[in-house]
Image (spheres, rainbow, N blue to C red):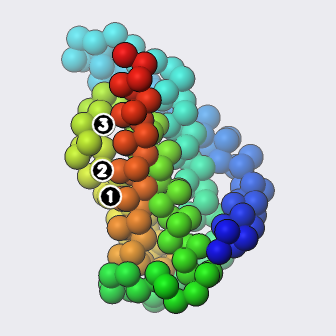
Amino acid sequence: MLEYIYRDMLSMVRFLPYGLVLGGVVFAVFFRTMNKIRKRGGKGPAAMLPVAAFGTYLSLMLVITFLSRESGSGGDGIDLELFSTWGINDRNNAFVVENVLLFIPYGILGPWAIERLRRFWSCVLLGAVTSLTIETLQLVTERGYFQIDDILTNTLGTAVGFLVWRLFFRGKR
């Protein structure tokens, strides 16, 4: 299983330049929008590094979940059975672990960049909504399967990431 995870992660490195370029654009838009909202609320500008990190991560995630797949690779695949992927074989188990790993940075970088995500349920709920959006778009664009397991494991990854962020944040206080 670990070899599958290693190979899959290595194969995603080729998409890094696309993600970084898109990340620059997303960062610029995200940062500007965020600061307009903060200014209306009477707050000062947001810190640039956390917003840049979160924007770049979101861009990389979109590139990985959409551009790394062939068009039509999802077909009409919808899997609404819970835990249907785990335990079948090492390949499927690797997919489950990769889905958790993909969203751990969401739970770390989201609260670092956006104050409203510094509450556990806010962060986890937004992670779940983001995952649901990705799964729905994969279904509509036929660039992946819509799997309830993916939403569950991505949400779990967000929760794990948030707990890591919380440990780090509390340690810095």
Answer left or right for 130 relative to 47: left
Mark 1 burial class by Cα count in 10 Å: few <14, some 14-19, many 20+: many
Contact (Cβ within 8 Å) of mark 1 with mark 3: no
Where is residue 171 shown, x and y percent of the image?
41, 23
Q: Earlier in the sequence, mark 1 or mark 3?
A: 3
Q: Residue drawn at (39%, 33%), measured in percent from left and top?
A: 167
Quadrant the N terminus occupies: bottom right
The amino acid type of the residue labelled 1 equals: Ala
Q: Earlier in the sequence, mark 2 or mark 3?
A: 3
Where is residue 24 shown, x and y percent of the image?
61, 35
The amino acid type of the residue labelled 2 equals: Val
Can the viewer see residue 51 in this picture? yes
Q: CA distance from mark 1 to mark 2?
A: 6 Å
Secondary structure state at the residue bearing disc 1: helix
Answer left or right for 105 relative to 14: left
Q: Is residue 26 above or below residue 2?
A: above
Query: Can you identify the residue that label 2 sits on?
Result: 124
Q: Is residue 143 above or below residue 113?
A: below
Can the viewer see residue 112 in this picture? no
Contact (Cβ within 8 Å) of mark 1 with mark 2: yes
Secondary structure state at the residue bearing disc 3: helix
Where is residue 63 shown, x and y percent of the image?
61, 56
Query: Can you identify the residue that label 1 sits on?
Result: 128
Mark 2 burial class by Cα count in 10 Å: few <14, some 14-19, many 20+: many
Query: Can you identify the residue that label 3 sits on?
Result: 117
